[in-house]
Amino acid sequence: MDKRIAAGAYIIILVFAIFLLRLFYLQIIKGDEYKTIAESNRLRTIKVPAPRGIIYDRNNKPLVKNIPSYDISLVREETSDPETLAALCNLLGLNPTAVKGRLDSAVNPFEPVKIKENISWEEVVKVEARRLDFPGVQIDVETGREYIYGSVASHVIGYLGRLTPKQAKSPDFRDVPKSAFIGQWGLEKIYDKYLRGVAGERIIEVDATGREVRAFGEKGPVKGNDIKLTIDMDLQVIAEELLKNKAGAVVALDPNTGDILVLASAPSFDPNLFARGIKYEDWEAVVNDPKKPLLNRALQSQYPPGSTFKIITAIAGREQGKLTDETKAVCRGGLYLGSHLFKCWRKKGHGVIAFKRAIVESCDVFFYEAGRKTGIDKIADYASAFGLGEAAGINLAEEKSGIVPSTAWKYKIKKEQWYIGETFNTAIGQGYVSATPVQMARLISAVANNGKLYKLNLIHAAGAKPQVVREVNLKPETFEAVRNALAGAVAEPGGTGYMARSKLVSIAGKTGTAQVVSEKKGGKKPTGDYRDHAWFVAYAPATDPQIAMSVFVEHGGHGGTASAPIAKAVIEEYYKKRVQGAEGQRGQVTNNE
Amino acid sequence: MFDKETLKKFEWPIFVTVLILSFIGVMTIYSATRSLTGEGQQSFYLKQLFWLFIGMLCFVSLISFDYRWFIRSAYVLFVISVILLVAVIIAGKIGMGAQRWISLGPFSFQPSEIFKICFVLAISRYLADSERKDTLGLKELFQMMFAFVVLPLILILKQPDLGTGLMLLFIFSSVILTVGTRKKLIVVTIIIALVSVPFLGNIVWSGLKDYQKQRLVAFIDPKTDPQGSSYHINQSKITIGSGKIFGKGYLKGTQGPLRFLPERHTDFIFSAFAEEWGFTGGVFLFLLYLFIILRGFDTAKKARDPEGRYLALGITYMISFYFIINVGMTLGVVPVVGVPLPFMSYGGTALLSNYIAIGILINVRMRRFLLFY
């Protein structure tokens, strides 16, 4: 009997020994491993979004605001009660079945599942007020953007959007919280890394249900860098106001620095739509809009520059010694080349007309002759020198480079020889030649500043010096004569740019009309999509240029009527600001008087 | 009743060890259920202290009487406890919520806890009677099997309380194997045990609730469902393992208060203890239990009569098996069966029955020299 009792005791002792070994194995051999698991059980690292850098205009006006964006998530484990779920869905206008499906597909029952993004502040308040009724509800805050000026400059600023699944996989966004907003377009996209800043980290202790229990330490976020644009928002607003309900573009530069003062494209879109997580139908509407609001027309639409190109023809002719102030042509409303009549826009003709008035009144016949004298390849050389046919170098959207036709170009592209008639067409900016509004702005800016082509700046880098990309060396009298004529085109009676005439400031400029339909049928006034595109290039003040710009309006009809007033309005605003002593100018005001 | 002689022989070692264990239990309950958010401490540890006090009262009154008093009324007590069990089941079926009626906070009064004690009393009485008559044979074995094990087992398994059911089987066969003098008896018991394991296993398996089946499957293959049944096992191993050699320190454990560890103050209290006190604490705790158990076997050896011997054996085996099943479960070497750790797990009835059991054991030990009364 005693032996048996002892045997029982030994068996129990043996079991204890086995347990001791097991305890040794768990705590000493695998202790570190389990300790790590226990730590990862309870400690979560949460990314704290950094405040995004603000985008300012050249006068330090903020163009964007950081606003909180709220997402709502649920923890399945705590919201198993269908009635609660139904009540919550009712509050947020969601379909309970769909939400349930989302919750059930979550692998980990303690992992919060997003059920609605970008809920309104009112909804946040509603949910928070009934916090106790909704266990397992989490409201997360992300930094979103509000675009203060709405659609103004939307093509420049761009917009933020949530990380796309593709981006989420890319190493570039490794440090970005999955639900964060990042730049998806425009400068917001291009400078995303710079604006983004560095997300902070909060280490928190959570319980088994994922609820935060204690904070354990925090690494503060580093605010993103601000960006200052060269854009002058006051001018931009006016330009876009005048482009309303039109399609077109306005580009204004500081001819002494290359700063872009206005970069407008119409129609535009409201980036706030995107920032709030655009609804599918809104997105469809924007993308499929026949007016193409997402197209940046300042950079991406190339059209024949029309009579604005006569500036190049004039410069080429004078530099080649083919044109002088005294050069005359007789205009009877057209010019026959063989049996083909090349018309002047003025049916009754200009009569005998010399160099300056030919520009002032934009006489086509004079420039047919000028083109014939100068030759297409020389014209092409000067066009290229003034930046046509090459991208202006704004890395905002894919820029079109336009076309500078020449004999070599035609042979390369069409394997055909060049005809003199094509020289006629090119000389007055029709036919093959094409340019973007940015290129035209750059061209007129170089004319205004005696041939300097600056690197165009959209970003105002402190202490940066203007960079001259190329200098076109012309005889001083060439510039003088051309500029004189351009001033006349606006100021003198009979000038085509009279619509830009201003009481405040002397403006010099040139109109242009890009033909949409080459032969107007029956002399009827074309309407709508058959109307010509209107160009206007200008700078001011005429004697001491501080601003140079191009305006382009699709189907605007005559350059003089459609585009010149827009240029005038922008220039007048600019001038008023200068007179009032607006700061933020880098251009030196030189007074030649 | 008490007399000076008996009082002098009071068994301090077991009593003090049990007290130490109880206070370690209260401390661990406090730590495992403490609030980290400042939302206010749950009152589990206070309730446990209250039950500890009640347990002491029972203990004191129990050692005042000679244990033969209980042996005399063993069958009556056994019948009463069976009736209690049946009452609970019937009330539960009717939906009166009898268990809730005797609910004490989050813990419901379990008649099966009381039944365990009465079971030990009843088999001790029967075995002692047979020994005196020298008639412990196969007939008696089957009688006992039927009267004390099979019938109540069926009742208890309906509760469902897998743990208690298994305990009865273990205790019964261990006692028989320890005292059976005839070879035939031993062989038959082993055969019955071997045969009844799959047979009972089958009955048990079909009678198990889904979650219990899941637990067993999860035990065999912990990867089956990490968030379900094996979650318990995994989290328990993580909790214990993370304590390493010296533990994280008292009130420094995280798995319990953060609720990663399920049943942190009841079935898995050992894990919560091992997390804070480490391997050294674990070994210390093992030694305390081992001391009580070996002292129990010693008491059985020295008992003055068969009744005392069987009582001491039954109680010692009971404490041993509870410890083994509970700690084995937390260590992941025994399937998850919901049994409390004696003296430490939170729970009024369990603590009460533990103290009654220890009271009986000490009673036997104190009175081992008394031949006449």
Image (spheres, coloured by chain):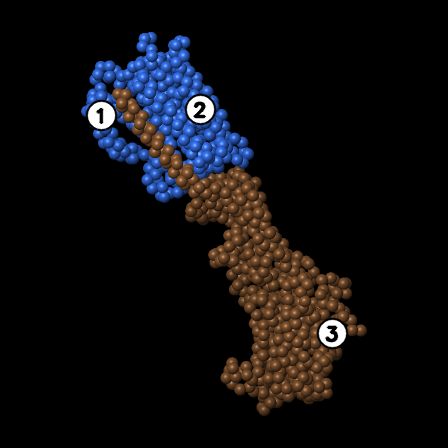
Chain colours: A brown, B blue
Task: Mark 3 vs mark 1: give the one in front.
Answer: 1
Q: What SS does tag 3 mark?
A: loop
Name, please, the residue furthest toward the bottom: A338
Q: Nearer the viewer, residue A47 or B302?
A: B302
Q: Do discs 1 and 2 share a chain? A: yes
- Circle number at residue A542: 3
What is the crowding at mark 1: few (fewer than 14 residues within 10 Å), some, or many (at least 20)? some
Q: Position of residue A236 (x, y in %)?
A: 66, 64
Residue bearing the label numbered 2:
B20
Instruction: Give the image location of residue A120, x and y in percent.
Output: 57, 49
As rendered, which of A517 and B268 lies closer to the eye?
B268
Q: CA distance from mark 2 to mark 3?
A: 101 Å
The residue singled out by tag 1 in the image is: B186
Among the 4 quarters of the image, the one containing residue B373: top left
Taking the spot 52% from the left edge, 44% from the top edge, the residue there is A138
- Above or below A424: residue A251: above
Left-right relation of A435 to A116? right
Q: Quadrant of the N terminus of chain A?
A: top left
Q: Secondary structure at mark 2?
A: helix
Q: In this rendering, is residue A344 above or below A194? A: below
Q: Are marks 3 and 1 in contact (CB under 8 Å)?
A: no
Q: Residue at x 54, y 67 (%)?
A: A290
Q: Chain of mark 3?
A: A
Question: At 55% from the left edge and 45% from the top edge, which residue is drawn?
Answer: A202
Residue A239 position (above or below residue A408)? above
SS at badge 1? helix
Name the image quarter holding the C terminus of chain A.
bottom right
Q: Which mark is residue A117?
A: none
Say whether disc 1 or disc 2 marks the residue closer to the N-terminus: 2
The lab-note entry on whether marks 2 and 3 share a chain reads no
Report the amino acid beneath label 1: Ile
Determine the residue located farthest toward the right in the rendered image: A593
